[in-house]
Amino acid sequence: MSMMPESKEFAVCSHCGSSRVRPRRVLAGPILSANRGANSFHCEDCGQDGLLVTFNSEDAVAKFRDQKHGEIAEKEKLPPKVEAIPIIPLDARAPLGSPLLESMPFRSAEVVSIRWKDQAIEKTEYAVNFEEYWRAVGSTRYRASTVYVLDIGGINHGEPSFQAMRELAKCDCKILFDLGVSSTEDVMDGFMVDVEKVIASTKSLRTLQDFKDIYALTDDCVPCIDWDDGVLWAGGVKTHNLKEIAATLKGIGYDSLVFMDMKRLGTWSGPSMELAATLPSFGLRIYLGGGIKEEDVPMLLDKGIYAALIDPYTPVIRDMVVPKSTAAKPTAAETPKPAATPDARPSPV
């Protein structure tokens, strides 16, 4: 009887390819996974924490290591980049309402263009494989070191794309992950795929007590206020006490806040200038999203915004990922023009 040779796996750091890694210890926290301690490793060479990447041959490890060293060298040659974070709407659902593609290859996951319509995130005209989209925004031309993932299945249907996210976590970037958190258990699930921060959004939660419960579990979660002519809560409920909500979140202990202008999201029409000027007064690090293009970032940083969340498929990104021969041309109705005044929308504050 012939014997099959035993397969061998090589585990290395996902950031630099080093094999000099050790398990990361968690010294405090009621739930290990919520503090990213479970299955997490520390690299002795690059000093970063994360999950390991496995390969079935030393040649594959060497190729991965050379690729990572090349990327690091290229990034070190470039000047520091302002904090611009691309929004990546991830869709890994099967068509016609079939179950999630948990058993399918990651190539089935797509990055789609979106709009906010009828209290839901709706896919629009563009869709490309994630790997292709990441090659563009993670390239030396665009240089995104952090991405903001909107899990469409999780947000709209309560069915997060965990298999796709496990593969995404292998990319050399930090991930801010909105999976449609509606409970503390969802926060735990989010950290199980090794992301930098889990986002807890008002559109998926019901009260400020939910944010208190989440903070009691972990301080690695970032609250998000979704704005649609009011603060949008689960079930379509709207309130207008924005300053009070921000003050309460700060009082709980949060030091950062995402503010997502849902009506502007995916329109490339520019941010609300009044919001950009007002939000930093809340005394929190503000991540502002909704309609923002790359050209808006310097102005937002000048106004005190901590980070700008860039709309998916801005003209800059479309030029890198969408073939010109097949690119759809959005109509005027689909792509609102910037208002003639600094901000035509009612001020929320």
Image: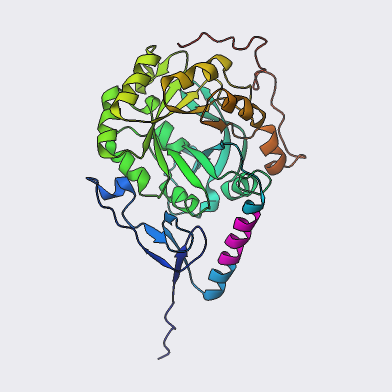
Determine the residue positioned at 49% across, 59% down.
Answer: 46
Determine the residue positioned at 28% across, 37% down.
Answer: 184
The image shows residue 62, relative to residue 250, as above or below, that is below
Give the image quarter of residue 205: top left
**Closer to us: 222 or 301:** 301
Give the image quarter of residue 332: top right
Relative to 27, 296 lies left or right? right
The stretch drawn in magenta includes residue 70: yes
Secondary structure, magenta segment, majority class: helix
* Residue 336 placement (x, y as % from top left): 65, 18
Instruction: Give the magenta part as a residue range.
Output: 64-74
Determine the residue positioned at 53% across, 69% down.
Answer: 61
Q: Outermost residue, bottom direction?
A: 1
* Residue 70 placement (x, y as % from top left): 63, 60
The image shows residue 132, relative to residue 252, as above or below, that is below
* Residue 282 placement (x, y as % from top left): 42, 20
Q: Quadrant of the N terminus?
A: bottom left
* Residue 56 placement (x, y as % from top left): 49, 72
The stretch drawn in magenta includes residue 267: no
The image shows residue 281, relative to residue 322, as above or below, that is above
Relative to 243, 299 lies left or right? right
Q: Quadrant of the C terminus?
A: top left
